[in-house]
Amino acid sequence: MIPIEHLLLGTALFLCLSVAASKLAARFGIPALLLFLLIGMLAGSDGPGGIYFDNPWLAQAVGVVALALILFAGGLDTRLDDIRPVFRRGLILATLGVSITALAVGWFASVLLGVSLLEGILLGAIISSTDAAAVLTLLRGKGVHLKRGLKPLLEFESGSNDPMAVFLTLGMIRLLQEPQLSVLNLIPMFVQQMALGGLLGYLLGKGMVLVINRVRLEYDGLYSVLMLALVLLIYGITTVLGGNGFLAVYVAGLWLGNRDFIHQRSLRRFMDGIAWLMQIVMFLTLGLQVFPSELPQVAPAGLLIAAFLIFAARPVSVLVSLAFARMQWRERLFVAWVGLRGAAPIILATFPLLAGVSQADMIFNLVFFIVLTSVLFQGTLIVPAARLLSVEARQAEQPHSPLAFVMDDGKIASDLMELMIPVDSEAVGKRILNLQLPRGVLVVLVGRGGEMIVPDGSTVLEAGDTLLLLAPPPLQSAIRDRLTRPAAIVE
């Protein structure tokens, strides 16, 4: 039995090493999740750490809890005003795009590996979801901003495509275990999972707002505990009733994040920290679960499948899904390239292991190798791709004022935010009156050339102006995007 002191020491060292790795990743443009996985692999039985870990059930349990909390935190930070213009595109990418990717990779894998088409599609379903959130973190670390609606599109796709991948994975496992069933038998399962997931996420999300705002706890710190409990409760209730729990927590987070709730500033920061902790724990656990000595056996097939996924399946799925979208070809190509695979595929790869599916060990190792290849190859080239395809927008780093105006019940009524008007902003040359800012938003001061101007509606904005605005937190992201959005270029 390992002494508890040794466990605590090892855990602390792993967490500190992971935090340091994230700093290193941001500096050198390497996705942090790659370093988290490598740390877990090095700590395992095949690495210098020598920790033997072969428990797919525990790895899956940790991964499911972590992914649920990460998806909730992602929904909490997503503004409805941002995703509304790209909702249709994102939804098509998250459903049709994921399905096309799964089918294409499934066909290729069945031909390459000599397995059945269902087993091939199971592999394709597992690696069909993307982790664009990791890409956006990488872009922010390198100071790269994306033009137009690319950022909300990628955020919405990454937050909403995991439920479809989960459904396809479970559906393929069911067809493999019950050969008498047909694909048509999956339709009721799809309708039930998605309908219940979306409906319960919406209803329980509304209930979550009411509970947080109306309960009167004696200690502020208990609100964080309450939020964690409610997230897990939403996932548990939805899953037990036959719905998609991942979709439910994302929808609940999306609903809560776009409503006023008590202690929202501290709760948002708390969930952001929890999301990072869950990423670290999840990647370390999954890194421990894999045995690196087994990866060379699947390396040739893994490289070919990864190449097909990156250069064929993902681009085709994006081009088909966005066929009728009003987007430039450069933007479509960038979305196609940003098909980074993350933790979700590795978590889903534990499902066949626990279900006793034939070839489950090979599928797990293949998925792990494909994810590593995707992160290493695509992840390191994200920033050059954004610049090569001219989808990078010039935008100065925006400082954020710490001053906030709080109501008596603890809710933030308005927050003082500061931003600079870029040279290419469409707001340059416009009067404040013509900006059509939302009701309740006030431009308090304008800094220009070392002077502070108290503006009125007729004040004309100039490039380089620093604005001090008073705005409710839910509107700040939309306001920032509106005032820094590049002016349309007539081609």
Image (cartoon, rainbow, N blue to C red):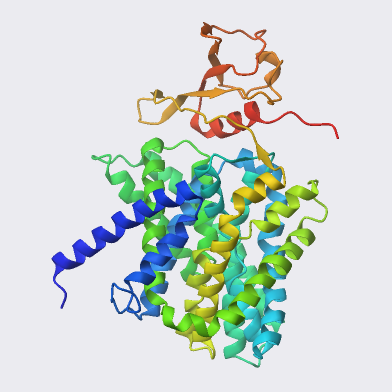
**Is residue 439 rendered to the left or right of residue 53?**
right
Q: Which residue is drawn at 51% across and 62% down?
A: 246
Q: Residue at x 55, y 48 (%)?
A: 136
The picture quadrant where one finds residue 305 is bottom right
Q: Classify the position of the C terminus by image quarter.
A: top right
Task: Give how far across and how far down residue 168 sits, in percent.
Answer: 62, 74
**Is residue 379 rendered to the left or right of residue 22?**
right
Task: Decide which of 81, 219 is in the foreground and name it.
Answer: 81
Q: Which residue is drawn at 20% across and 62% down?
A: 8
Task: Decide which of 417, 475 is in the foreground and name it.
Answer: 417
Q: How many labels does the image show?
A: 0
Say whether residue 165 is visible: yes
Task: Decide which of 233, 441 is in the foreground and name it.
Answer: 441
Say whether residue 262 is visible: no
The relative height of residue 17 versus residue 295 in the rendered view (above or below) is: above
Q: Classify the position of the N terminus by image quarter.
A: bottom left
The picture quadrant where one finds residue 485 is top right
Task: Decide which of 33, 106 is in the foreground and name it.
Answer: 33
The residue most toward the bottom is 180
Q: Residue at x 42, y 60 (%)?
A: 35
The residue most toward the right is 491
The relative height of residue 87 versus residue 200 in the rendered view (above or below) is: above
Task: Give how far across and how far down residue 184 sits, in percent.
Answer: 71, 80
Task: Give how far across and how far down residue 483 sits, in percent.
Answer: 63, 26
Task: Give how far across and how far down residue 338 sits, in percent.
Answer: 64, 56
